[in-house]
Image: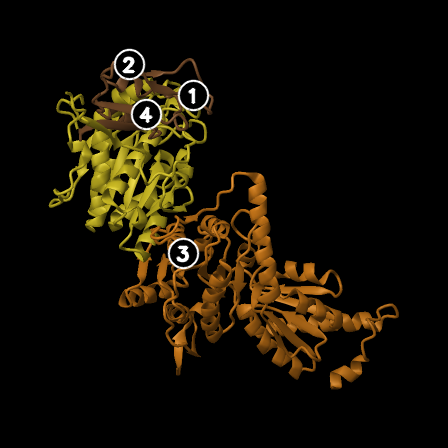
Amino acid sequence: MTVMVPETLLTPVYAYPESLTHVPTHYCPGCTHGIAHRLIAEVIDELGVRQDTIGVASVGCSVFSYRYFATDFAQAPHGRAPAVATGIKRVHPDRLVFTYQGDGDLASIGIAEILHAAVRGDPITVFFVNNAIYGMTGGQMAPTTLPGQKTSSSPLGRDAATTGAPLRMSELLAQLDGAAYVVRRSLHDVVHIRRAKKAIRQAFEVQQQGLGFAMVELLSSCPTNWGMTPEAALGFIRDEMVPAFPLGDFKVPGDFKSPDDVKSPDDVKSPDAPTAKGQA
Amino acid sequence: MKGTVEVDESLCKGCALCIPVCPKGLLRIADDRFNARGVHPAELDDPAELCTGCELCATMCPEAAITVLRAVKA
Amino acid sequence: MAIELLKGNVAFAEAAVRAGCEAYFGYPITPQTEALEHMAKRMPELGRAFVQAESELAAINMVLGAAAAGARAMTSSSSPGTSLMMEALSYMAGSELPAVLVDVMRGGPGLGNIAPAQSDYLQMVKGGGHGDYRMIVLAPATVQELIDLTTLAFDLADRYRVVTVVLADGSLGQMMEGAELPPMRPLAERPAWSLTGARGREPNLISSIHLDPEEMEAFNQHLQAKYAEIAEREVRVEHHLLDDARIAVVAFGTAGRIAKTAIAAARADGLAVGLLRPVTLWPFPEADLRALAERVDALLVFEMNAGQMVEDVRRVVEGRVPVHFYGRAGGVMPMPEEVVDALRGIEDARRERAGHDRGADRGAPDLAEEVTA
């Protein structure tokens, strides 16, 4: 006689993050803003800090980021998110305060605010989404636009002689004593997405440990304004942006340790996950 | 089966970034239908139950539209 | 509490501390830097937030953040610095955030000078930032009033969720006068709408975005209703020797104070003059001014600028009575004698007109009687 034994149970190992609101986003199909939002929400879930987190939305494609995160949120004027975050953090030193900014917001109009937040070592966490273009306003040149890159305000390709070379914010801010954690990651494939998530988590932990200013720069895509498919856009990040904006850790606190007792799910190797070969 | 995935078609924008990421090529764009957004959503095409629940597709998805389930010994 | 000799800038800073200001963000600018310096010492003493920001632009955005986080927040500056704040003030109006801004005005436009002036009236009252919004604007004339109005400013800001401006000038900021500081108040509770972390409640959002035009209009109507309520309830004005006045000076702040000296001298000379001193520049004391215009022969608007409040006076008076203007611009401190001369000039011109057959004024009593009265 055969006894029916239940062999296996299908359990969700990945599901929609609690810290996202289920509101369908307005981002273009394939836009890596969605990946960045998702990673931040996953980390907030894993750290269990959703109810203690206050986000600051900036101006750009992510102007409506407050619609998608299930946390308290403030909308800042263009470029001013770090100053607004400082104001919030000084009133609530024990809450987690983060900003989410694009290249116009952070590297152009807001460059004084981000610089001085880092100078002061304000213990906020900044997510800098660098896609080398101004998305929301229809694809103009950004301080991070690559030489020769065609945008709607550099139709003949960016001329470095008259408009300068791409601005590398992570290298710039890492020089400041008040900057505790400054890293650049990319979202162009699964390996790099997983590394980006680790950095996002560490950037929050740096704030939790009161170590100073933390920023994760995320190389991101803009398929629509680059005039590419989402897949090709990821290739553009890999082939063109990474050489111009090297990935890596530009500043990490000396004695900083990611808490050992909590393993990030990414540490668990999936049977089919490809492994990277010696890349940051 | 070792695993499976479910695509939330109300969130899927049909960006197709998940398609090349699956090591076994088990995802496809459903050309024969549209979701409520008017795009062809992604869907699992895994008649042979080859999915291992590796989560690569969910890791790539910008909409967090993919739920991944894995077999756990009961 | 005792009367002590206080410098204006220090007085308003300490008044703010005692009113429960939890966060101060500022930038050095003459003639108000003593306020920043006082806060730099006091706020850390009390475990409250202080940042010397990288600019006034950053400072007002820090105020925005702190206010969003539910704290009584303020900044202080002077005219070139307040210009940098206009963007955030519009955002704060659109997000209904309470805050206090003290503007210690100086000569302009541009970099101008560090001498006292009143040339930010239009900027503050008509709104230097974009969009349909108002801020409550309070105009102190003495160090005591500066203290009292700074305290009031926090209360009004919280009550209505608006930015409240204390519009002072360099002479008030710098002068030392006997005044009394109020006792220390406990810190206020965090409002339910503020950002404190969504513990045990739905997340709060502080934003000024309304993409849908009809939604935006509805929100604007809500703001306008709020402003109408403020206009009805919060007008403050001083009537000084107006009961028998034939000519009324309309002046605010330090100009009002100078006017009082001028009025005393003019009365000694036999001129029946008084002063209407708006203490709230917004809401403007329209009812008081209209009533006054019905019964005097002339108004003299006296300001330390090239003519700003006079536009509102003319608008409200609607031609009922001649409105004259006397002002000194660019940071020049007018002397009371100048105002007396202006008053005399008005009176002389009026008499000359009255002397003509067709120059009758509106049934006023015989001049000779007035002069000897």
Tell me, yes or no, whether dots 4 and 2 are on the same chain.
yes
Q: Quadrant of the C terminus of chain C?
A: bottom right
Q: Amino acid at mark 1?
A: Pro
Dot in front, 1 or 3:
3
* Relative side of A184 to C271, left or right: left
In the rendered view, would you say C241 is above or below C149? below
Q: In this orientation, which residue lies closer to the viewer: C270 or A188?
A: A188
Quadrant of the rendered image containing residue B44: top left
Badge 3 element: helix
Dot in front, 3 or 2:
2
Judging from the image, mark 4 belongs to the subunit labelled B
Between the residue at mark 3 and the residue at mark 2, the CA separation in whole angstroms equals: 57 Å
Between the residue at mark 1 and the residue at mark 3, the CA separation in whole angstroms equals: 43 Å
Tell me, yes or no, whether dots 3 and 2 are on the same chain.
no
Quadrant of the rendered image containing residue A203: top left
Dot in front, 1 or 4:
4
In the rendered view, would you say A169 is above or below C316? above
Please name the residue that numbered disc 4 is placed on: B6
Q: Are marks 1 and 4 in contact (CB under 8 Å)?
A: no
Badge 2 element: loop
Q: Colour of chain A?
A: yellow
Please name the residue that numbered disc 1 is placed on: A155
